[in-house]
């Protein structure tokens, strides 16, 4: 699934670049023919895709990440301008997000209860937490665009609610064998977070902070409550 999602992101970047080349050709033709007219009802940036690095916050003692903890998302946002120039708007949408957190926090089921504890790096071949969410983002948008040129500055600030569709913790110790924990009842099914995106034309920086901890009732072996939260930093791509 990860491979297909990466291919999806690459296709989005390709299509965006193709659209820009096509726009330049169109502008060249229009200079020699009929000038373009502004569309008084145009909308912007209604499809999105992100790729980011997931940095855990609220880490317990002994916790660490390794390799690249991937965050991916894609979806649709309905752009609703709120002023005559249509450069201020709100947007409500629906999307999907995927997180693959690679860390040393092991989840094991003992006596019907899930137990959480960090292990030493090098003592395992693989250890990850995979999360799939359905998300509903709401944005406030500012841009200096118009309906003729799609090259513009943008700053979008948003808030989103995410519903957990599927979760899996997978631990593969160096000595062999695999431990998989699915449908962990200690994970928050509903999560809230705030985000911001800003940039020019195709390239836009993206940052998301999870206001809800990943785990709600998980207790570490030492008795401390597990309070991991997500911070995603990366890029977001918009398509009309």
Image: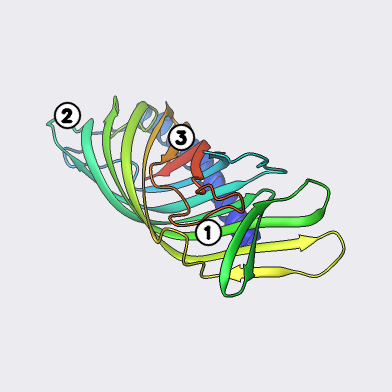
Q: Residue furthest front?
A: 223
Q: Residue at x 65, y 53 (%)?
A: 117
Q: Which residue is mark 1?
A: 131
- Percent x, y for residue 70? 60, 47
- Distance (Cα) linking label 3 and label 1: 18 Å
Q: Quadrant of the N terminus?
A: bottom right
Q: Which disc number belongs to residue 207? A: 3
Is residue 11 in view from this perspective? yes
Q: Residue at x 47, y 32 (%)?
A: 204
Mark 2 nearby-residue class (10 Å; few <14, some 14–19, many ≥20): some
Report the side of 183 relative to 77 (left or right).
right
- State the SS at label 1: strand
Mark 1 nearby-residue class (10 Å; few <14, some 14–19, many ≥20): some
Report the side of 215 relative to 129 (left or right).
left
Q: Nearer the viewer, residue 75 or 21?
A: 75
- Percent x, y for residue 82? 14, 36
Mark 3 nearby-residue class (10 Å; few <14, some 14–19, many ≥20): many
Note whether 196 is above or below 225 in the view shown: above
Q: Quadrant of the C terminus?
A: top left
- Distance (Cα) linking label 1 and label 2: 40 Å
- State the SS at label 3: strand
Q: Earlier in the sequence, mark 3 or mark 1?
A: 1
Q: Where is residue 54, by image quadrant?
A: top right
Q: Which residue is mark 2?
A: 85
- Percent x, y for residue 8? 56, 55
Q: Residue at x 42, y 47 (%)?
A: 48
- State the SS at label 2: loop
Q: Earlier in the sequence, mark 1 or mark 2?
A: 2
């Amino acid at each position: 699934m990860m491979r297909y999602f990466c291919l999806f992101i690459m296709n989005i970047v390709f299509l965006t670049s193709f659209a820009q080349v096509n726009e330049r050709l169109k502008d060249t033709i229009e200079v020699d023919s009929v000038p373009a007219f502004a569309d008084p009802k145009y909308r912007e940036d209604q499809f999105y895709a992100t790729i980011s690095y997931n940095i855990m916050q609220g880490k317990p003692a002994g916790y660490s990440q390794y390799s690249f903890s991937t965050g991916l998302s894609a979806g649709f946002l309905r752009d609703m301008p709120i002023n005559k120039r249509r450069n201020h708007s709100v947007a409500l949408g629906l999307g999907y997000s995927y997180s693959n957190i690679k860390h040393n926090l092991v989840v094991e089921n003992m006596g019907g209860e899930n137990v959480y504890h960090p292990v030493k790096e090098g003592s395992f071949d693989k250890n990850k937490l995979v999360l799939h969410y359905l998300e509903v983002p709401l944005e406030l948008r500012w841009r200096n665009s118009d309906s003729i040129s799609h090259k513009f500055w943008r700053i979008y600030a948003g808030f989103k609610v995410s519903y957990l569709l599927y979760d899996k913790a997978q631990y593969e110790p160096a000595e062999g064998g695999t431990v998989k924990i699915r449908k962990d009842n200690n994970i928050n099914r509903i999560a809230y977070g705030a985000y911001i995106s800003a940039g020019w034309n195709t390239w836009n920086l993206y940052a998301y902070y999870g206001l809800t901890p990943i785990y709600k009732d998980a207790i570490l072996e030492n008795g401390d409550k597990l309070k991991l939260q997500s911070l995603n930093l990366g890029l977001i791509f918009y398509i009309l």
